[in-house]
Image: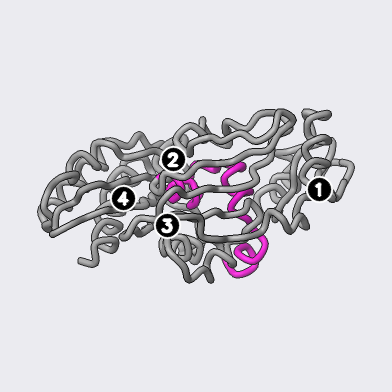
Amino acid sequence: MIPPQFDYIRASSIDEAVDILSEDPNAKALAGGQSLIPLLKLRAAAPSKLVDIGRLKELRYVRQAGDGLAVGALATHAELERWAGPCGVLPEAARQIGDPQIRSMGTIGGSLAHADPAADWPAVVLALGAVVKARGPSGLREVPAEEFFQGPYSTALQQGELIVEVSIPRCPPRASYVKIAKTHNDFAIAGVAAAVWAKDGVVEEVRLAATGVGLKPVRLRKAEEAIRGRKIAGDLLAEVAEAASREVEPVSDVRASAEYRRAMAGVAARRALRRALGL
């Protein structure tokens, strides 16, 4: 289909983009366009203005920041796929997103702002305890990932705000992301990210987060409780998988039934933990 008519504006700075978005509630920011452009073609979105922020180089970076990472909102999936520093779960997750074209254009900030309930990055940033930094008319605001996703395609972003950075406070020594999908580059039927801190075979801290199994990405707190403080063993992972399956609240859609998604949440949780722990 042909997209509806809109005004196209290429922003020359973050402040200019924020000003335009603040003045017009029907304006939309355009980063890589891998989520927004299909919606325009389907006329599922009809913005009055498209504010292109894709050439704001100050938002395109991945760098270490203390024990963690700072990831600019315009860092592409492909750039994160090539990242060779700490937080190895980032390239692992990135290579499971779409095809080379999508990865070369799509951005982490765009993915998080779009908040598709079956997208990959939301589960990863939840498991990493990330903070989403947004610039708006009132300045910079920091939103913990657990508060950022509010529902299907709904976030805590306020009018005029742009995601400018994803801050990861500390990189876990062991982490992994496992997605179960119909094809390698499809959206998740169930995906689980696991971040683990272990010593002498005992799990000291763990964060598990799932995507594709509800109306928004979720922390798997009961599954975390099932493994935290316990010695790593095969039967323990089976217990965690069972807890994860009971905890999620999936819905049926064209990709899978709710029952299948529930079962796959447990499978993905077990595989993610096994991979993170090197078992």
Residue bearing the label numbered 3: 181
The answer to whether 185 is drawn above or below residue 269 in the figure is below
* Point 67% across, 58% down: residue: 60
Which is nearer the N-term, disc 1 or disc 3?
A: 1
Q: Main secondary structure of the magenta part?
A: helix
Magenta region? 99-126
Residue at x 48% of width, y 52% of height: 120
Q: Which amino acid type is marked by label 3?
A: Ala
Helix, strand or loop at label 3? It is loop
Which residue is nearer to you in this view: 68 or 146?
68
Q: Is residue 163 above or below residue 159?
A: below
- Rendered image: mark on residue 264: 4
Q: Which residue is mark 1?
A: 13
- Mark 1 or mark 4, whichever is nearer to me: 1
The kind of residue tagged 2 is Pro
Neighbour tally class for label 2: few under 14, some 14-19, many 20 plus, Cα within 10 Å? many
Q: Earlier in the sequence, mark 2 or mark 4?
A: 2
Q: Are marks 2 and 4 in contact (CB under 8 Å)?
A: no
Amino acid type, mark 1: Ser
Q: Residue 93, image x and y in percent?
A: 45, 60
Residue to which mark 2 is pinned: 217
Q: Earlier in the sequence, mark 4 or mark 3?
A: 3
Residue contact at pointers 1 and 4, CB within 8 angstroms: no
Nearer to the camera, 159 or 267: 159
- Verify CB contact (< 8 Å) between mark 2 and mark 1: no
